[in-house]
Image (cartoon, rainbow, N blue to C red):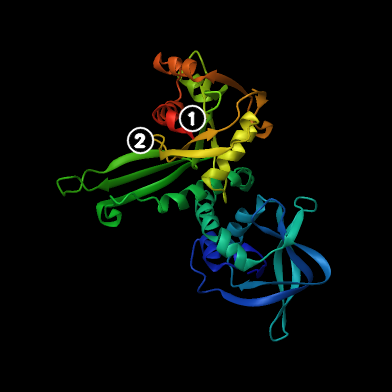
Amino acid sequence: MPDLFFYGTLQHVPLLELVLGRKAEDLQLSRVELADHSVYAVQDQIFPMIQAEPGGTAHGLLAQGLSDNDVARLAFYEGGFEYDLQRRTVTRADGTTATAQVFFPAPGTWQPGGPWSLGDWVDNWGPVTLLAAEEEMAYFGRVEAATIARYAPATLMRAWAKLAAQARKTGDSRDVAEDVIVHRRNRAYFDYFGVDEIELQHRKYDGTMGPVLKRSALMQGSAVIILPYDPLRDSVLLVEQFRAPPFLIGDPEPWIWETVAGMIDPGETPEQAAHRECMEEAGLTLNALHYAGGAYSSTGSSTEFVHLYIGLADLTETISGGGLDTEGEDIRSRILPFDTFKQMLDSHGFKNLQLLAAAHWLIRNRDRLRGS
């Protein structure tokens, strides 16, 4: 059975156990060093890479007693990111050596950044990585490793949203552990979005447990919605882009006028995401943000939680061709005088729910914003 040397995130035993799908208590784990190598953070990523470096020392964890299935699961977790196993000799604290396999990145795949710290990674990215790995490993044997890697940013985005959801309380909580019984949960689909299926019972208002229900949910990250408003010129800015779901349902007008909107990236606050999205979609720098509330976009079908904002800005120019090419976006913007905007709102000229919610908040608070 092969022995492996972990220099990066898999030194974190909770992650290692999650990837293996079992407890690591029957493995022999020991701290070792790999001479003439160093570990660096990967540029623009949250995981590290190792490279040969004369005089360097890579500290890590030697895992002995791994099964062939363990190695297959590890290769699935690492392989889609262009990491391959190579043999190296590592040294224990007592000076003895061992031969182990090490996951090395394919040459030129990643660019090194600064030195990488396991402790800093655990503090900053450990919890979200565990949630992402839990979803990814559910597809072991069902999805190619390259597919897992392709949608890793979206998986992390969903994991970041799960962390936020766990802290989301209004003070009206019930005992979920006592009032909900899960019989089966299946991760049915993995892509930019995920789909989970579940069979469960929940306690009814009369105190009894209800029947077993079969439900599914579109698994998404959290999002920000920003309606740009210029209180000096009393105008708003809208963006328009093609939307596939209205097209799929047969709507003859799938180019939809909306607010600026986008998903919250891992590590971002909603406010940071709002500023970034306004620049990406509308070339717009915001002067201030006013929070208009947060809610699930569709509690019966989706996990998406949206944060609504009114963004104060100087609205003097529109753009065409906004958005990111990497996301297939083609966006144009339009500035409307508030009276025209309200008239279109009252005549049901908009089809985007988030736009309606932000607009009604603006109507209630417009005088205050203009006065300030």
Name the N-terminal-most of marks 2 and 1. 2
Relative to 325, is 261 on the left or the right?
left
Q: Position of residue 121 (x, y in %)?
A: 61, 62
Camera-nearest residue between 255 and 130: 255
User: Which residue is at 62% across, 77% downward?
Assistant: 30
Kind of residue at badge 2: Gly
C-alpha separation, residue under disc 2 versus residue under disc 1:
37 Å
Task: Kindly state the secondary structure of the residue where label 1 is placed.
Answer: helix
Residue under label 1: 370
User: Which residue is at 63% across, 32% downward?
Assistant: 284
Camera-nearest residue between 288 and 200: 288
Numbered mark located on residue 225 in the image? none
User: Which residue is at 70% across, 66% downward?
Assistant: 101
Q: Position of residue 40 (x, y in %)?
A: 73, 62
Kind of residue at badge 1: Arg
Residue under label 2: 300
| Local crowd size for mark 1, using a 10 Å CA cut-off: few (<14), some (14–19), many (≥20) | few
Q: Is residue 141 above or below residue 335?
A: below
User: Which residue is at 48% across, 30% downward?
Assistant: 370
Q: Position of residue 200 (x, y in %)?
A: 30, 46
Classify residue 77 by image quadrant: bottom right
Task: Kindly state the secondary structure of the residue where label 2 is placed.
Answer: loop
- Which residue lies most toward the front here? 371
Classify residue 11 by image quadrant: bottom right
- Can you see residue 202? yes
